[in-house]
Image: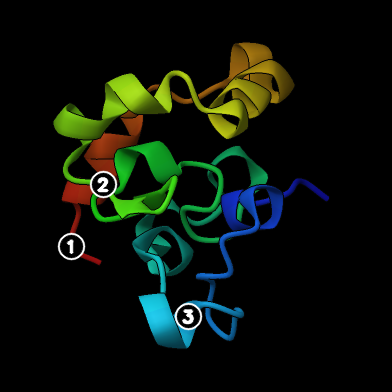
């Protein structure tokens, strides 16, 4: 089974996670429109396209503002490597996010 961002990064912001009460549940853990992308639960393997995720202790903004930092993230690099030719681009995922959910 492929791991989601909260499992790899250990943030504890998934529903029922160790930091969910204190820091809130991460939007990637609840974004159902990206469920199944790259084999993840909700947006758990597409967190870089979801606004409001928390990385390195700070809430991140919109995709446009955070993607530069995401490119350096070990989790994104892992997903790219695992998915190779099946990797979904941000543009493909943005189309899914524009659909009402």
Q: From this viewpoint, is residue 24 visible? A: no
Q: Residues within 10 Å of mark 3 (few under 14, many from 20)?
A: some
Measuring from the top left, give residue 28's x and y in whole percent. 42, 58
Q: Residues within 10 Å of mark 2 (few under 14, many from 20)?
A: some
Q: Residue at x 50, y 70 (%)?
A: 13
**What is the number of the mark on residue 20?**
3
Measuring from the top left, give residue 45's x and y in whole percent. 55, 44
The residue indicated by pointer 1 is 100
Q: Nearer the viewer, mark 1 or mark 3?
A: 3
Quadrant assignment, res 79: top right
Element type at mark 2: loop
Q: Residue at x 59, y 49 (%)?
A: 5
Sequence-earlier tag: 1 or 3: 3
Element type at mark 1: loop
The residue indicated by pointer 2 is 60
- Quarter of the image with the C terminus in it: bottom left
């Amino acid at each position: 089974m492929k791991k989601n961002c909260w499992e790899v990064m250990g943030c504890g912001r998934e529903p029922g996670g160790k930091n969910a009460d204190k820091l809130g549940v991460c939007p990637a853990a609840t974004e159902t429109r990206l469920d199944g992308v790259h084999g993840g639960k909700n947006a758990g393997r597409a967190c870089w396209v979801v606004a409001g995720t928390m990385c390195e202790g700070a809430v991140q903004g919109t995709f446009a503002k955070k993607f530069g930092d995401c490119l350096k993230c070990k989790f994104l690099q892992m997903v790219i490597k695992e998915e190779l030719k099946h990797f979904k681009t941000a543009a493909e995922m943005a189309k899914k996010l524009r659909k009402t959910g």
